[in-house]
Amino acid sequence: MLARLLRQMPPTARAARAAMGVRRLAAMPLHPQKKFASKYFDVEEVMFADQPEQIVRGGRTLFPKLPAALEGVKQIGVIGWGSQGPAQAQNFRESLEGSDIKVKVGLREGSSSMKAARACGFTEEKGTLGEMYKVISESDMVLLLISDAACVEEYKNVFKALKPRTTLGLSHGFLLGHLESVHEQFPADVDVVLCAPKGMGPSVRRLYEQGREVNGSGINASFAVHQDVTGRATERALAWAVGVGSPYIFQTTLNAEWRSDIFGERCILLGGVHGMIESLFRYYESHGMAAHEAFKTSGEVITGPITRTISHDGIKAVHDNLSPADRQIFKTAYCASYTPSRSIIEECYDSVSSGNEIRDVVMAAKRFDKYPMGCIDNTRTWKVGAEVRKAGGTPEQRKAVPVNPLTAGVYCAMMMAQIDCLYDRGHVYSEIVNESVIESVDSLNPYMHARGVSYMVDNCSVTARLGSRKWAPRFDYILTEQAFPAIDAKAAPDEALFQRFLAHPVHDMLKTCSSLRPSVDISVS
Amino acid sequence: MLARLLRQMPPTARAARAAMGVRRLAAMPLHPQKKFASKYFDVEEVMFADQPEQIVRGGRTLFPKLPAALEGVKQIGVIGWGSQGPAQAQNFRESLEGSDIKVKVGLREGSSSMKAARACGFTEEKGTLGEMYKVISESDMVLLLISDAACVEEYKNVFKALKPRTTLGLSHGFLLGHLESVHEQFPADVDVVLCAPKGMGPSVRRLYEQGREVNGSGINASFAVHQDVTGRATERALAWAVGVGSPYIFQTTLNAEWRSDIFGERCILLGGVHGMIESLFRYYESHGMAAHEAFKTSGEVITGPITRTISHDGIKAVHDNLSPADRQIFKTAYCASYTPSRSIIEECYDSVSSGNEIRDVVMAAKRFDKYPMGCIDNTRTWKVGAEVRKAGGTPEQRKAVPVNPLTAGVYCAMMMAQIDCLYDRGHVYSEIVNESVIESVDSLNPYMHARGVSYMVDNCSVTARLGSRKWAPRFDYILTEQAFPAIDAKAAPDEALFQRFLAHPVHDMLKTCSSLRPSVDISVS
């Protein structure tokens, strides 16, 4: 069904490339190098625009297959209790209910998270909570969900503690990025697999819970097999993704994952949208709008109606829903914002891909004792935002705020610039739309809508929080310095650029994706 | 005289360290490893706080000694016509007038700068202008003043073109930083020396011209000898520094130079002051000040009276000149701003020292064809600034604007945070004060005062321009997110932090430095 829908959608590869207006990199080292197969899960082959991909659909109906897919695994150790740990440990435990596979949480001795884990039913008495290295050394599958900084500090000891032929699971390729930068490797005698849910931990849990009522609700995930010594790495990685509730699972590589992930959160997912709202709020205020109105027109419009429209109907629908007059304003704003946004986005990709961002994160962690990360929502913009939320009526009323076409044009331009950058750099389409669109509208923006920017950003990983703090100001400045003056000067829009937007193959893909998504309410109360 | 003055000044090493409130790094790899001597110039040994340094005083009276110090050099090739090229070529030529040493400018074939060089009297007819590789291959001393990006592209060809036993001169350690990052080295058969004027090219020229009337006017420079195959490298480097008009020359290493230079311009020299003014302007406007008043209170106060006070009387004088009531506001603002500023400053130093910033610059240059650097003074802040300058009266009137104590506290805090960072990282004191204070108040801020932020930033190197664009927004955000809310909340000042400021050994040093400076007018018309 999915396969059929998707096959109908794309234009030919050539037309798709022409529509993108870009030339593809000759080599695609970020694409998976070979096809995968599974004895337990249906693998569907689909065409996303000009790219063939293999995907697996998840869902609760598959939970009974998990024990067989996890054959040889008696205990799954979930190490860490940050953003992903609580969500994945609880989801996987629930999905495996009735089997003899134990999910055991491993934490540092004396960790303050012990209490939180116990409150979720992981306890020493039941043998489902313990000291991390002990849990690592006794587990057949180890999901290493400690922070990136902790990974850098602990990886040597973790590697030593792993039993031979254990399946080491990562939810992020960060550790590979770090190993590359210090010229080291994973131990040769273990599997290394990835399951990377495309949303922060709290929404991985929330949508899984919603899935009890609506089968298929959950956060999409990418998976990858980096080392396979047991011959069972693919089945275990897929079982993991299904077990934590992913409705749609696609293949990537660890190399592509860490690049797109560290990049995406610095741009439209967190840093980009943060800086954009700061800059738009100021823009509207300096053009005479009262404070509450200015925040509604910037922050509320993005996290409310635009987010809902993109989630349900895709990016182009934001444009199509506007009146003819408003479409002109959208077009001007889009064209004024695309290239400035893209310039920062390209800089960010280079910074990530060269290893600079990983080095930055590792160095920042060493400064935390003296210079901890500060509060980001203490500024005028977010204080006004808090007032607006307080005064703002029901979630439905707040989502019904009229869409300002200028805000819409700026937001869509940055999102499209990120999509084009990832495409040009050679990422698979599933990764592109998940890291640029779906994670934003189905996981992150709803958190900002509910409780502000810091609730969104600071519920993410330290790597994401640092990156968001680093890049938000850059997007703010480039829009303020380049895009807004062009909008005010009523600069003639670049017609070719805008036609590329209207004809972009990503729109059909997103329309299909949203038609496949169960109709759960993604808003956060 | 200088030596005596400076010897009187510092407290004991122990007291100085205690006053800094910091522990020095055990090793000091950024300090010069051995003493230097000269047959032609007087070398004075001075104590800066707890550090002994050797310095040479420049001045026009030394110009007659240059030919002897440059023995063996018949032709000096000045390669490049960016920020430093025009200034150094003209200054050195003028200083060597009457000798038989030729200063010849070398540029790329067909370079648009050929015309500008001819306008300054460097011509093919006189044999003082030519194609760069030809000039390199025929010169005995080659001052490589092309842009950092061009260095990265051209260095292999430059190295090939150098005659054996040539003295290769750099005004920046950037190339060493790049060579380290690609694991390469300078050719073994040439001298490698540094003369790094602590100001942008236009002010190196301006102050040299003022020096015709006032002996000793000029921009300080650091020098370093990285390779010495001729045995004459030190004399040539010193002659170069004297020849371009430096009044005060101190020793450093290439490693220390590129770190402190790339770092300093990202912080208080360019990026820091840029972001600070943007954030202060917004702060004052959002607290009800009219636009012109807000810019006067932020931008004008910093580049006008504060800059003049620090140039003449040092940093502490900014505080001491305030009324008792205003000193309280200064103190609150200082204490609220120091640690947030320091956190970005430490991040920046790490980013520079790890090679990340150099990698960033190299990658940015590859994007310029598609994403050129944009205009930075198109924002509301700088447009209001331009109006203020236009309406603002004489330079003297503009410098007499009353000092706002909040602005003063924020500015001095960032400057002191930079000084402390460089000290902790192990730089020599001369380098610290030149890269943190003197370059700012005697070279850069006067340019911003005269014509705005872009006139200051975009007259600097591409590395500086990129870095300023990258870090200005970070300083803006950290002040807006952390410092200003603390000021508004009237947070109790950290007494120990403020006592460290009042007792800091840098104040005595700066007082002496300014007493040694000829009283030229550093304002730019």
Image (spheres, coloured by chain):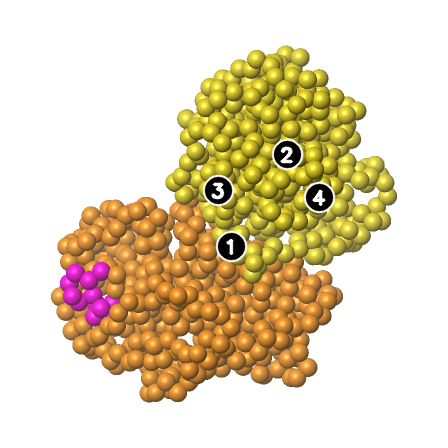
Chain colours: A orange, B yellow
What residue is shown at x 39% (from left), y 40% (from top)?
B183
- Image marks 2 and 4: residues in contact by CB distance under 8 Å: no
Q: Which residue is mark 3?
A: B157
The spot of residue B44 in percent (x, y) is 59, 14
Which of the chains bears the disc numbered 1?
Answer: B
Q: Which residue is mark 2?
A: B104
Determine whether the residue tagged by mark 2 lies in a helix, strand or loop.
strand
Magenta stretch: includes residue A236: yes
Could you say which disc has been placed on residue B116 in the image? 4
Q: Earlier in the sequence, mark 1 or mark 4?
A: 4
Q: CA distance from mark 2 to mark 3?
A: 19 Å
Could you say which disc has been placed on residue A395 in the image? none
What residue is shown at x 34% (from left), y 63% (from top)?
A29
Three-letter amino acid code of the residue under disc 2: Lys
Could you say which disc has been placed on residue B366 in the image? 1
Q: Earlier in the sequence, mark 1 or mark 2?
A: 2
Q: Is residue B143 above or below residue A299?
A: above
Q: Earlier in the sequence, mark 3 or mark 4?
A: 4
Q: CA distance from mark 2 to mark 4?
A: 14 Å
The spot of residue B445 in percent (x, y) is 70, 39
Which of the chains bears the disc numbered 3?
Answer: B
Q: Are marks 2 and 3 on the same chain?
A: yes
Q: CA distance from mark 1 to mark 4?
A: 26 Å
- Which quadrant of the structure image shows residue A120? bottom left
What residue is shown at x 25% (from left), y 72% (from top)?
A35
Q: CA distance from mark 3 to mark 1?
A: 19 Å
- Apparent side of residue B29 relative to residue B169 in the rendered image (left or right): left
- Viewer-closest of A29 and A159: A29
- Image marks 1 and 4: residues in contact by CB distance under 8 Å: no
